[in-house]
Amino acid sequence: MNSTVSMTHPPSTPVGAVAGWRGLVTDWSSDREAFHVSWGKAMMWIFLLSDTFVFSCFLIGYMTVRVSTTVPWPNPSQVFALNVGGADVPLLLIAIMTFVLISSSGTMAMAVNCASRRDRINAAALMIATATLGETFVGMQAFEWSKLILHEGVLPWGNPMGAAQFGSAFFMITGFHGLHVTVGVIYLLTVATRLLRGRYEQTGNYQIVEIAGLYWHFVDLVWVFIFALFYLW
């Protein structure tokens, strides 16, 4: 009889382990809350925290190189000047880029507000507007890169206007940020398309818009530090 019981009732430890993993997968896939925060929002915060460390390392490395180099560092007001009507206007393109990106934070905030009221049409439209502003920013950044490479001769491994580290620091930091903006544009357009198709109507959960907003606001905040440390210093 004991052997029969042992065969019909397997050890409790493996069963508990399987149930635990199944419970974890079930909670994750159903967007359950942990510490009163949804899985999606918690994972986005963790990602943004890790990304903060990466950008911080890049910017600290840039500042260290700049203060330690013995070769004169190029003047950003001259390097990033834009010729308008025969006169060089310092940082004009950078100012427009900053205005466009900061404006996109406003449209993203309005999209989150519309999503909280379950107004999916306006939320999607505002997300598309945000993505358009982000793509405009990336396009102007591509113009800035082409100007530096083709006209100024600045390359990642050389710089005719001063310290050789200028090119590598500039292309690495702004390129990494531009990649984040591009990924954000794709992310926003994907969520906006699903909103228009009524993907979230059945559940009534529009928190994905807020999560996308967290990512976009982070990208905008990082640009403020890049703008201050790279273009104004």
Image: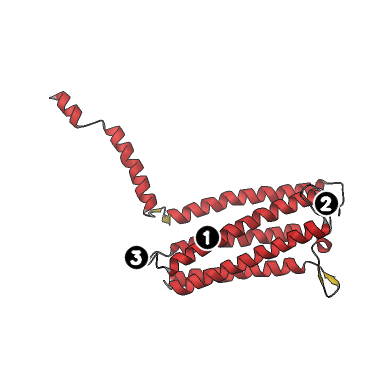
Quickly name the residue at label 1: 187
Asked if the residue under mark 2 is in contact with the one under mark 3, i.e. CB atoms within 8 Å, the reply is: no
Distance from disc 3 to disc 1, alpha carbons, whole Å, reads 21 Å
Within 10 Å of disc 3 (Cα), the crowding (few <14, some 14-19, many 20+) is few
**Residue 85 lies in what quarter of the image?**
bottom right
* Disc ID at residue 159: 2
Could you say which quadrant of the image residue 170 lies in?
A: bottom right
Secondary structure beneath label 2: loop
Mark 1 Cα-neighbour bin, 10 Å: few <14, some 14–19, many ≥20: some
Nearer to the camera, 40 or 145: 145
Q: Position of residue 229 (x, y in %)?
A: 74, 57
- The secondary element bearing badge 1 is classed as helix
CB within 8 Å, label 1 to label 2: no
The percent position of residue 122, horizontal first and vertical second, equals 48, 74
Q: Is residue 123 left or right of residue 63?
A: left
> Where's the C terminus, which quadrant?
bottom right
Q: Secondary structure at mark 3?
A: loop
Q: In this rendering, does residue 109 appear at all?
A: no
In x, y percent, where is residue 98? 68, 67
Give the left or right position of residue 82, taking residue 209 as reference. Answer: right
Q: Residue at x 59, y 51 (%)?
A: 51
Distance of mark 3 from mark 2, alpha carbons? 56 Å
Lateral position of residue 200 relative to residue 163, left or right: left
Q: Mark 1 and mark 2: span between their CA atoms? A: 35 Å
Q: Is residue 139 above or below residue 155?
A: below
Q: Is residue 60 above or below residue 151?
A: above
Disc 3: which residue:
202
Point out residue 158 in the picture as x, y percentages from the top left corner: 81, 48
Earlier along the polypeptide chain: callout 1 or callout 2? 2
Residue at the far front: name it: 150
* Any part of residue 187 in sight: yes
Taking 14 as reference, is 51 above or below it?
A: below
